[in-house]
Amino acid sequence: MNIALNLVAVRTIIRKEVSRVLRIWIQTIVPPAITMTLYFIIFGNLIGRRIGSMDGFDYMQYIAPGLIMMSVITNSYGNVVSSFFGAKFTRYVDEMLVSPMSNAAIIIGHVAGGVLRGLLVGSLVTIIALFFTKLEVAHPFIMVTIVLLSSIVFSLAGFINAVFASKFDDISIIPTFVLTPLTYLGGVFYSISMLPEFWQTVSKANPILYMVNAFRYGVLGTSDISVAYAYIILIGFVILLFSACMLLMRKGVGIRE
Amino acid sequence: MQALTIRNLRKTYASGNEALKGIDLNVEAGDFYALLGPNGAGKTTAIGIITSLINKSAGEVEVFGHSIDSDLEAAKSCIGLVPQEINLNLWDSVYNIVSNQAGYYGIAGKVAHGRVEKYLRSMHLWDRRADIARHLSGGMKRRLMIARALVHEPRLLILDEPTAGVDIEIRRSMWKFLEEINEAGTTIILTTHYLEEAESLCRNIGIIDGGKIIEDAKMSTVLRKLQREVVILSLANSVAVAPQLEGFATKLRGENELEVEKGPDRDLNELFVQLNAKDIKVVSMRNKANRLEELFIGLVEGKQAENSSV
């Protein structure tokens, strides 16, 4: 493999992706900012006052890390699935497929694009959160690594969705019916210690719970789960999903006849 | 050296459609090769396999000695593709589209910028470089695809219907440009429905029909197989009835135009001798149809008749 060629190719895809995100900022950056502001106003400011504290933090502080992580996850996923499916749909994906860049470079370039959008929106939501509450980062390394790994996992998942999608409806099914419910049930708005034991066990099967709680631990220093488990699960998903992406690209599923 | 070697290439789609039935093809380095065939003959499938956009069912493909099975990266580096369908990122700028393609081939910085400028200028698109691709006309989009295919300066350029929808003036300037890059050493494989384009540009020709190569030879050799040729003569004076000429079939197309059909055993000198003897003066002459078109139709129809009789 020609490493220099692939590095230039990855950089090119990242530049293209960032330029796309900024070109259509009204679709990519503004909506999550508005949605998250509404969450902070309604759940944090209005309802949160009545809830009081949770795990020793006021409710607004408690939900802020979860909302930041939710925006990172949905935007990382959404960026890759819409960008790669768009390239497939109008066939300009062929530009990449006929070139000598490796399949890994195509995947890494798109995932990096997804991660950058996720982090950009996540940063924006963090700034919005600071207008409503005070956040002091308890464990910066854990916060950064967890948000990066989560973003990579959902970017890879978005890539797989795009590979299998054959029409525009297919790129909204997973976010609507899988991603959103799992995120809402992943401890963004509550601690699973509030649930009956059975539902606590069920909740632990939700990978987003680990991401949200590990990130919350990074920011606030409190978590419902072991952060070590979160790392194991995230790294496991990165390996699994990247391998799946490579296999799909090698077989040409959805992109080669 | 062979620019392209294809051996026993087969493709059967999941639908069961056998698009390629074991084709063999050799294209010499530096050649300007026409790959012709009716719609659905298998041209685009063959090109898709060469460029790795379609998975083959069987057979071997080598590009400048690099097998697409064992040395795909090197094989891909040698190829530039202008596909039949417009496959541009219509939301991106003309400059970015070509520049991104350079990046996909590992070309960056000043080298990439220089190449982008060179090929956009050669395709008369430099002044439109900031425009979004969807704002370009159909012909401009085709030229943009050519610039995109050339930016990494491939040794083998494959053009699948590159001049469809391009006006005649631009088409001729594209022909001139393609001849120049061919003279500079780029091997070109061209598929086109404009057979005069293939006849005037290409030195060798392959005709594919029903997933098989039915002709693969020099253009001049193929054209010699033409059984009949019809020419239209413009006459200096009007004639009331078509003259009877020995060995030629004639038909009046108006008072001053005569259609003459000649067989392979007759030459034009004989025609003019007979016309002179009848005191018929010819002002100008043109072919009724392109010679290659005549031959192409003859070959394809002949093959179809052969198939239907089996």
Image (cartoon, helix red, strand yellow):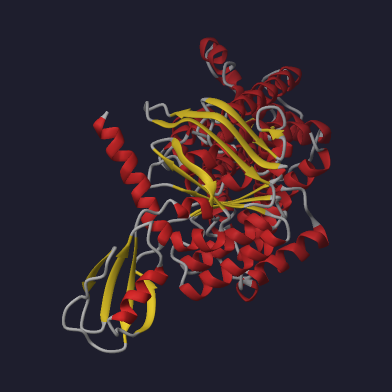
Image x and y of residue A132, in percent: 65, 49
The residue lying at 69 percent from left, 24 percent from top is A234
Q: Position of residue B134 (x, y in %)?
A: 50, 64
Residue B264 pos. (x, y %): 38, 56
* Direction left: furthest residue: B240
Is residue B69 toward the left or the right of residue B281 in the image? right
Q: Is residue A63 visible?
A: no
Instruction: Answer above or below: position of B194 versus A41.
Output: below
Residue depicted at x 16% and y 78%: B241
Displayed quadrant of residue B16? top left
- Which quadrant: the N terminus of chain B? top right
Query: Along the line of sight, which residue is nearer the eye, B274 or B28?
Result: B274
Q: Is residue B171 left or right of residue B274?
A: right
Residue in the foreground of this view, choosing between B36 and B128: B36
Quarter occupied by residue B47: top right
Of the 4 image quadrants, the one containing the C terminus of chain B is top left
- Does B10 appear above or below B143? above
User: In front: B41, or B27?
Assistant: B27
**Residue B40, visible in the rendered structure:** yes
- Residue B17 percent across, percent down from the top left: 37, 30
Most extreme residue toward the front, as rendered? B277
Residue name at image x 76 percent, y 64 percent:
B113
